[in-house]
Image (cartoon, rainbow, N blue to C red):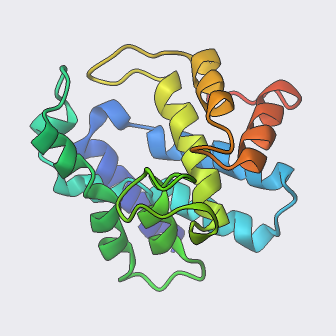
Amino acid sequence: MEGTVRAIVALAEKRDPYAAGHQTRVSRLACAVAREMDLPGEQIEGIRVAGLLHDIGKVYIPTDILNKPTRLTDIEMMLIKTHPSVGSEILEIIPFNWPVAQIALQHHERLNGSGYPAGLSGSEILLEAKILAVADVVEAMSNHRPYRPALGKDKALEEICNNSGILYDSDAVDVCLRVFTKNDFKFT
């Protein structure tokens, strides 16, 4: 199973070099948050696997859109927003011991219902997806993207703080901040 997961991660990263390492870094941070939240080891393992695979649906997105150095058009953004659904469809095929496909499907959902693809809110979103969402935002903002330079860890932590309880789960945000301050978490 681990080899299969790693192969899928490698496939995604070969296709989107700007995101190389993104899924691994998100997985590491999400697991650090989950451990600090004292979640059971089996649940943390599910978060680890889901983190490694959460963006697999981007294999469906044309590379010229993934690597576009300027702002995306509305149509291109609509296409990007299909990646959680596509990823979930791919991951549903694999008989994981955890709800990996559902976690990947929900990683862009937001507490207030403003996320995608289903506009879920509050308790409709799995805890694992809430944790992954926080880790995904922090990692993405901290690192370079084709359309912008890295904004840095401080700006990323400010984003989750400012939107704690609105977009992001407040427990996951509080623990993520603690992981960076108390535990001195580093992506590298």
Image label count: 0
State whether residue 157 is above or below residue 170. above
Q: Nearer the viewer, residue 67 or 83?
A: 83
Judged left or right of residue 116, residue 138 is: right
Q: What is the x, y in percent for residue 164? A: 68, 39
Instruction: Tell whether 75 sits left or right of 124.
Output: left
Does the image show residue 156?
yes
Q: Quadrant of residue 185?
A: top right
Which residue is drawn at the image coordinates 13% and 33% (left, top)?
73
Q: Nearer the viewer, residue 134 or 123?
A: 123
Q: Position of residue 118 (x, y in %)?
A: 38, 65
- Which residue is at a point 76% across and 55% down the rendered structure image? 34
Determine whether, in the image, residue 66 is placed left or right of residue 52: left
Q: Residue 57 location, x and y as percent?
A: 29, 59
**Residue in the image at 85% along x and 49% along y:** 36
Establish if 111 lies above or below 77.
below
Does any portion of residue 32 appear in the rendered image?
no
Q: Looking at the picture, tell me which residue is in the foreground, 140 or 185.
A: 140
Who is closer to the viewer here, 12 or 82? 82
Q: Quadrant of residue 92?
A: bottom left
Indicate the position of residue 38 as horizontal and vertical percent values.
87, 59
Quarter of the figure that contains the C terminus: top right
Task: Decide if residue 183 is on the left or right side of residue 70.
Answer: right
* Residue located 33% across and 44% down the image: 13
